[in-house]
């Protein structure tokens, strides 16, 4: 049976939808059955990450850990998080997880290396917290 990818989403909901679209479009598949099995947990009620990073709001970490636990309990064997800002708590999430959590920046760096971009400036679009 193919491995199940968990997606911790909802931060924002369109980032999750965009990730799912890209995952589908970039998967080398010739039929439906060739695609990656995915379970999405979308929780738009996770407290604002940027506000928390700037010390002006509630930490989203408990909600992030709760989402990770739900995905693991449902059988996810790896977790992707399409929200850049949520990766501020990456170390804490990894420490609490039984399965690998893909790092958004590490994944981008690896993709750039595969394309032959080994150094130089890279632009990031994001919130003030990002």
Image (tube, grey):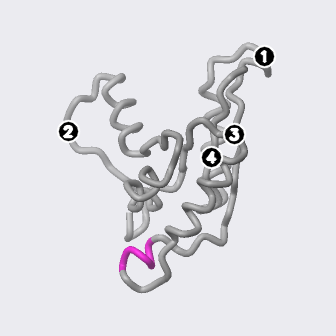
Residue position for label 4: 7
Q: Residue at x 68, y 27 (%)?
A: 36
Q: Is mark 2 on a helix, strand or loop?
A: loop
Instruction: Give the alpha-carbon distance from disc 1 to disc 3, as whole Å.
Output: 24 Å
Q: Position of residue 9 (x, y in %)?
A: 62, 55
Per the rendered image, the range of residues in magenta is 50-54
Q: In which quarter of the image is the N terminus?
A: top right
Instruction: Give the alpha-carbon distance from disc 2 to disc 3, as whole Å.
Output: 39 Å
Q: Which residue is drawn at 65% across and 39% down?
A: 76
Instruction: Give the alpha-carbon distance from disc 2 to disc 1, as whole Å.
Output: 38 Å
Q: Where is residue 103 in the image (x, y as percent from the top left)?
A: 42, 44
Instruction: Give the alpha-carbon distance from disc 1 to disc 4, as whole Å.
Output: 22 Å
Residue position for label 2: 120
Of the image marks 4 and 2, the number of the one nearer the N terminus: 4
Label drawn at residue 93? none
The part of the image, by quadrant, that contains residue 92 is bottom left
Q: Which of 125 and 72 is in front in this view?
A: 72
Q: Is mark 1 on a helix, strand or loop?
A: loop
Label 1–label 4 contact, CB within 8 A:
no
Q: Closer to the camera: disc 3 or disc 4?
A: 3
Q: Is mark 3 on a helix, strand or loop?
A: loop
Query: Most extreme residue toward the left, as rendered?
Result: 119
Label 2–label 1 contact, CB within 8 A:
no
Q: Closer to the camera: disc 4 or disc 2?
A: 4
Q: In which quarter of the image is the C terminus?
A: bottom left
Label 4–label 2 contact, CB within 8 A:
no
Q: Closer to the camera: disc 2 or disc 1?
A: 1
């Amino acid at each position: 049976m193919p491995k199940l990818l968990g997606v911790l989403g909802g931060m924002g909901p369109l980032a999750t939808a965009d990730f799912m679209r890209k995952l589908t479009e970039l998967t080398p598949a010739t039929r439906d059955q060739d695609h990656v099995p995915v379970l999405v947990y979308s929780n738009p009620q996770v407290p604002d990450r940027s506000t928390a990073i700037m010390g002006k709001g509630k930490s989203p970490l408990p909600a992030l850990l709760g989402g990770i636990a739900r995905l693991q309990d449902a059988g996810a064997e790896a977790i992707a998080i399409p929200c850049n800002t949520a990766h501020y708590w990456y170390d804490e999430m990894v420490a609490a997880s039984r399965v690998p959590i893909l790092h958004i920046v590490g994944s981008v760096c690896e993709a750039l290396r595969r394309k032959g971009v080994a150094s130089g400036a890279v632009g990031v679009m994001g919130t003030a917290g990002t």
